Amino acid sequence: MTDAVATVDLATFRRNVETLVAIAAPSEVMLAVKADAYGHGMLPMSLAALEAGATALAVLEVGAGLELRAAGVTVPLFAWLHGSSTDFRAAAESRIDVGISAVWQLEAIAESGAATPARVHLKIDTGLSRNGASAEDWPELVSTALHLQSQGFLEVYGAWSHLADASAADDEIALAKFVVAVEVATALGARFEKLHLAASSAGIRLPAARFDYVRFGIAAFGISPFDDVDAHGLGLQAPMTLSAPVVEIATLAAGHSTLGGLDVSLPEPATLALVAIGYGDGVQASAADRAEVLVGGSRRRIVALGVDRMLVDADDLAIAPGDRVVLFGSAERGEPTAEEWAAHADSIGDEIVASVAPRVPRVYTG
Ligand SMILES: *Cc1c(COP(=O)(O)O)cnc(C)c1O
């Protein structure tokens, strides 16, 4: 009997990517596969995204880009989170484009000793204030990059930013700031080959923000970036199904009992199923009081949650040990969704799927 498994249906994922490619066209899709493709597994999701029409991948860190290059991925890769140990030389020599937020990063590139110029995308902060050059620092970032370009250290290739997605109005303001920053850089002599700004939210709802690439992330994983419409409403479906087997079924008397090492206090006798998954597998403890699972064709609540076990209400269910319980999966199959779990956990769907523990095997279908 296998324990907890995260099944990832690549056919569903490819359909999502195809849907998003069609939405973005004629802009291209640079699929974001950060956080191990939001917990789905970076390499298989990257390959599936490219089959489905994405033309570039956004990987967060240079190290992840190097992994994809080692696996034979040849499309443009974009990494933007750098620290003092970032290997800019390896990035340049492996043709991994780097997002640049600060002058120190340009200097590190110049000092890296790379045999080939690094391809850089300069980042303007348009309001998210996480990184990127402020409007005040932007001319210096651009001028420094152009100077180092003239010395052969790098190629100024792109300009980009990231939207906060706090509201449509904020995104419009950020878009306007981005356009101004590109004009400022152009006046300083920059010639950008690629501009990119939108992620899932603006990529779907703000066509003017699509530019050359839309960096879709979570939407491709079947999770809506919006509060007012779910993935199903966007024509997207969740590729990941998290399930675990029933290991024991027991009818317990009213009062205090223990089953599988978990304590329960029952107001009346109840039949419970012990299921082989717990918060150590990434089940959100904060959602467990309110979340439902699908067991024996029925939506049931979680009665108790431990590190690798949980108890589920199984009254009147015709189930047996070995039957699988679905924690979240696809709305189309009547399963609870990661979006529902996110609502119960006061979180976002990204966190629910990305939190599935590494020890849970990912099994690919489709
Ligand atoms: C996470 C991320 C994305 C994708 O965002 P989603 O909202 O998941 O689509 C795109 N670009 C950058 C820079 C990111 O950090």
Image (cartoon, rainbow, N blue to C red):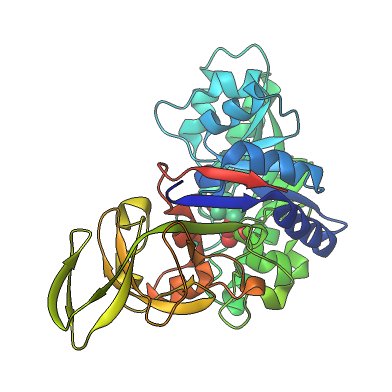
The residue shown at (67%, 73%) is 332
Residue with the most extreme bottom position: 268
- Using the image, determine if residue 22 lies above or below residue 266: above
For image coordinates 45% across by 56% down, the residue present is: 322
Query: In the rendered image, which quarter is residue 313 located in?
Result: bottom left
| Residue sitting nearer the eye, 60 or 161 | 60
Residue at (36, 51) in percent of width and height: 281
Question: Which sits in the foreground, 131 or 3?
Answer: 3
Asked whether 34 or 277 is in front, the reply is 277
**Image position, residue 306 (x, y; %):** 25, 60
41 vs 84, left or right, is right
Q: Considering only vertical position in the picture, is 211 above or below 52?
A: below
| Quarter of image, res 158 | top right
Please indicate, yes or no, whether residue 88 appears anywhere in the rendered image.
Answer: yes
Quadrant location, ligand no. 1 = bottom right
**Residue 82 horizontal side relative to residue 188, left or right:** left
Residue 267 image offset from top left, x and y in percent: 18, 88
Q: Position of residue 221 (x, y in %)?
A: 62, 58
Image coords of residue 59 (percent x, y): 58, 40
